[in-house]
Image (tube, helix red, strand yellow):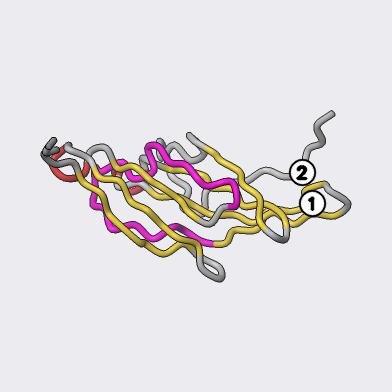
Amino acid sequence: NYQYVSTLTSPNAGNSQQYGSKIKIASTSIGYRMIVSQPAYNSSQGRLYSYTGTTTDGSTTAWTLEGAVETVTTVGDNFGYDFDITPDSSTLVVSAPNANAYAGKVYVYNHTSSLYELAQTLTSGAITVG
C-alpha cells in the first residue's frame, strides 16, 4: 500500500514549464534525495530542484526543498530534459540537448554538504580511433 505524503509544486510556478516531467529518487545517509526537472523553465532554459526526504520508522514523512541545481545554460537549452543520479545521490548527470547549437551538452555535478556543484561539462566532438 502507498500512503499519500505531500504535494510538491514548482518554486517558480508558471504556465507550461513542465515541472515534474522527470523525477528520480536516491538514498542518502539520513533518508532520500529526490531530483525534479522543469525543462521548460525560463523559455526552456531548464532547471532541476533537489529535495531531501526525512524518514521515520522507514517511511518518508516530509520533503524539503534543498535548492535549485545551478545551471550554466541559456534560454532554449532544455537543461534537465533528461538526467540520472547515482544510487547514493553523490553524482548527478544532466543533459541539455539544445545547448551548443543543438549539438548538446552533458553536465556532471557532485553533491557537497547541501547542494550540487558543477564538476564537469561534456560536449560532443570527433572521436579518433587508433
Q: Point out residue 114 in the picture as x, y percentages from the top left corner.
A: 55, 68
Task: From the image, tell me which residue sits under label 2.
Answer: 5
Q: Nearer the viewer, residue 62 or 87?
A: 87
Q: Point out residue 30 in the picture as x, y percentages from the top left corner.
A: 72, 60
Query: Outermost residue toward the right?
Result: 57
Q: Point out residue 80 in the picture as x, y percentages from the top left corner.
A: 39, 43
**Quadrant of res 83:** top left
Q: Nearer the viewer, residue 101 or 43?
A: 101
Residue in the picture at 51% in, 68% down: 112
Q: Residues within 10 Å of mark 1 (few under 14, many from 20)?
A: some
Q: Point out residue 88 in the picture as x, y percentages from the top left corner.
A: 60, 52
Marks 1/2 in contact by CB < 8 Å: the verdict is: yes
Task: From the image, tell me which residue sits under label 1.
Answer: 61
Q: Which residues are magenta?
A: 67-88
Residue in the picture at 59% in, 58% down: 65
**Quadrant of res 39:** top left
- Marks 1/2: CA distance? 6 Å
Which quadrant: the N terminus? top right
Instruction: Please name the amino acid that badge 2 sits on.
Output: Val
Vertical side of 18 occupied by 9: above or below: below
Instruction: Please name the amino acid that badge 1 sits on.
Output: Thr
Magenta region's main secondary structure?
loop
Q: Secondary structure at mark 1?
A: strand
Residue in the picture at 13% in, 35% down: 129
Left or right of residue 36: residue 119:
left
Q: Is residue 85 magenta?
A: yes
